[in-house]
Image (cartoon, rainbow, N blue to C red):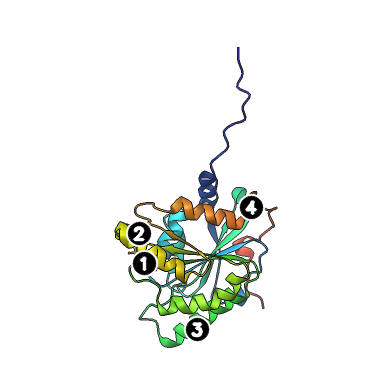
């Protein structure tokens, strides 16, 4: 009688990354940076113009239908929304959904306020590990995307990770996709660029694996640090 002494086949990096992303759960929401809890785990921020496909992308990556649509609830659209990630309820990273920008109906005063909140977050958030910029390649990078790129450029130069996700790739022909990739690569200034389609499930595992690597730079989960439960998080003062 023979025994199989081989260890069980280890999970592929894509399976590990997608399993990890699926653990995403709502952590907290805040109207401004100073209301956010200081965290020691790596944080990955999702930014983009309204309608770029950010909520759909977050929901697809986390394999949850409603997660990022919490950010679209009345009163929360201009908020910074945090989602905790990590197995067995132990948070080892955080996804941040920043308010979508460029929505025409938003009053000018709110737009200016948004820019300040966003710039403040992107420049000063200590545990920020990477930024994912959603861009609908049929419209390309807009003026507001360029402003954002200018804000983050010094931090990217210092080592902050940066990914441009070209959303709704199912709407592009092959040659349009190739062209969109090369234009975005020039604009991303050292950051990565990936095509993504929620409807065709294109680029999901590629983006998922990159985010996992950002949050686990040494290949294994960093020792988990305790993070307070959502109900315990209170704005200071
Ligand atoms: P957000 O404002 O950036 O959060 O954008 P949403 O996620 O709400 O998406 C805006 C619109 O684009 C919605 O009508 C989505 O159904 C559509 N959309 C998002 N992702 C895709 C995609 O991968 N393919 C296609 N064809 N449509 C998409």
Point out the tag, 4 or 1, that comes first from the N-terminus. Answer: 4
Disc 1 under 8 Å from ligand 1? The reply is no
x, y percent for residue 132: 50, 65
Q: Position of residue 196 (x, y in %)?
A: 40, 58
- Queried on whether the Cβ of the residue with tag 3 lies below 8 angstroms from ligand 1, the answer reads no
- Position in image of residue 180 (x %, y %): 37, 65
Q: Are marks 2 and 3 in contact (CB under 8 Å)?
A: no
Q: In 3D space, how far apart are the residues under numbered discs 2 and 3 (Cα atoms)?
A: 31 Å
Q: Position of residue 21 (x, y in %)?
A: 52, 53
Q: Earlier in the sequence, mark 1 or mark 3?
A: 3
Give the mark, 2 or 4, whose residue is nearer the N terminus.
4
Reading the image, the residue beneath label 2 is 169
Q: Which residue is mark 3?
A: 113
Measure how far apart labels 4 and 1 are at the Cα level.
Answer: 36 Å
Secondary element type, mark 1: loop
- Is there any visible trace of residue 134 in the rendered image? no
Work out whether residue 131 or residue 80 is closer to the camera in this orientation and state it.
131
- List the residue tagged with mark 4: 90
Q: Quadrant of the N terminus?
A: top right
Q: Are marks 2 and 1 in contact (CB under 8 Å)?
A: yes
> Disc 3 to disc 4, how far (Cα)?
34 Å
The mark that comes first in sequence, 2 or 3, is: 3
The CB of the residue at mark 2 lies under 8 Å from ligand 1? yes
Q: Which residue is mark 1?
A: 137
How many numbered badges does the structure rendering display? 4
Within the displayed image, which quadrant is ligand 1 positioned in? bottom left
Relative height, residue 224 to residue 144 (above, below): above
Among the two numbered marks 3 and 4 on one chain, the one whose residue lies closer to the N terminus: 4
Q: CA distance from mark 2 to mark 1?
A: 8 Å
Q: Is residue 136 visible?
A: yes
Query: Do the residues under discs 1 and 3 have CB atoms within 8 angstroms?
Result: no
Tell me which corner region of the image, top left, top right, bottom left or bottom right, holds residue 57: bottom left
């Amino acid at each position: 009688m023979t025994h199989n002494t081989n260890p069980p086949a280890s999970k592929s990096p894509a399976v590990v990354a997608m399993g990890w992303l699926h653990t995403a759960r709502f952590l907290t929401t805040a109207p401004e940076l100073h209301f956010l809890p200081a965290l020691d785990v790596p944080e990955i921020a999702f930014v983009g113009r309204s309608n770029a496909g950010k909520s759909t992308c977050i929901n697809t990556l986390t394999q949850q239908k409603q997660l990022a649509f919490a950010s679209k609830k009345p009163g929360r659209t201009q908020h910074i929304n945090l989602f905790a990630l990590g197995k067995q309820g132990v948070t080892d990273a955080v996804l941040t959904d920043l308010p979508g920008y460029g929505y025409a109906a938003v009053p000018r005063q709110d737009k200016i306020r948004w820019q300040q909140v966003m710039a403040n977050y992107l420049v000063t958030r200590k545990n920020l590990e990477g930024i994912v910029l959603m861009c609908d390649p049929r419209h390309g990078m807009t003026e507001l995307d360029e402003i954002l790129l200018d804000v983050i450029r010094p931090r990217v130069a210092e080592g902050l990770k940066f990914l441009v996700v070209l959303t709704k790739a199912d709407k592009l022909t092959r040659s349009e996709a190739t062209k969109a990739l090369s234009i975005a690569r020039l604009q991303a200034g050292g950051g990565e660029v990936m095509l993504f389609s929620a409807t065709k499930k294109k680029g999901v595992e590629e983006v998922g694996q990159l985010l996992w690597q950002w949050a686990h730079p040494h290949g294994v989960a960093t020792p988990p640090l305790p993070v307070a439960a959502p109900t315990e998080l209170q704005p200071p003062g």
